[in-house]
């Protein structure tokens, strides 16, 4: 919903979501199953044991780790990285996914 002040329309800006990379996963099948329950967070599997996750901007790497049950002793192992910037070479759908999901409204959309 837009607010108006006189003849000026105020359009609230969405806070960008945060991009995370999950790498070096010891048990990809288990993590893959846990990702299904991460709604409303969005995720993209790059290859076996590597994912990108988009979560609300206030989310920390520790929170992602906790939600995937990676934080406690005896759990599966992985590295959770909060991505502040990125650069590289990959297929166009990966870049398009990142661009689209970082501005997505979380809570409605299921993983692509």
Image (tube, rainbow, N blue to C red):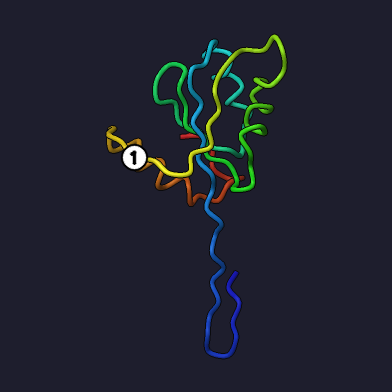
In the visual, does 2 lie left or right of 92?
A: right
- Quadrant housing residue 112: top left
What residue do we see at 28% from left, 38% from top? 92
Residue marked by disc 1: 87
> Residue visible at 45% across and 31% down?
44
Indicate the position of residue 99 as horizontal and vertical percent values: 40, 47
User: Whole-percent x and y of residue 38?
Assistant: 62, 31
Left or right side of 31 for 91: left
Q: Secondary structure at mark 1?
A: loop
In the rendered view, would you say 67 is above or below 33? Answer: below
Q: State the residue lying farthest toward the right.
A: 72
Total number of numbered labels? Answer: 1
Q: Residue at x 58, y 73 (%)?
A: 2
Q: Which is more toward the observer, 40 or 91?
A: 91
Seen in the picture, residue 48 relative to 7 is either above or below; the reply is above
- Which quadrant of the figure contains the N terminus? bottom right
Residue 77: x percent and y percent? 59, 14
Spot the residue most to the bottom. Answer: 6
- Residue 78 position within the rendered picture, expressed as x and y whole percent measured from the top left: 55, 19
Residue 7 to residue 38: above or below: below
Residue 104 versus residue 32 in the image, above or below: below
Q: Quadrant of residue 33?
A: top right
Which is nearer the eye, 111 or 44? 44
Name the residue located 65 percent from the left edge and 20 percent from the top edge.
70
């Amino acid at each position: 919903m837009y607010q108006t002040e006189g003849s000026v329309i105020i359009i609230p800006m969405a806070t960008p979501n945060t991009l995370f990379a999950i790498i070096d996963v010891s048990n990809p099948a288990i993590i893959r199953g846990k990702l299904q329950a991460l709604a409303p967070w969005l995720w993209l599997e790059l290859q076996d044991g590597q994912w990108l996750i988009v979560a609300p901007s206030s989310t920390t790497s520790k929170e992602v780790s906790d939600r995937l049950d990676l934080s406690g002793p005896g759990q599966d192992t992985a590295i959770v990285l909060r991505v502040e910037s990125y650069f590289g070479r990959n297929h166009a759908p990966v870049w398009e996914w990142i661009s689209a999901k970082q501005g997505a409204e979380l809570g409605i959309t299921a993983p692509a």
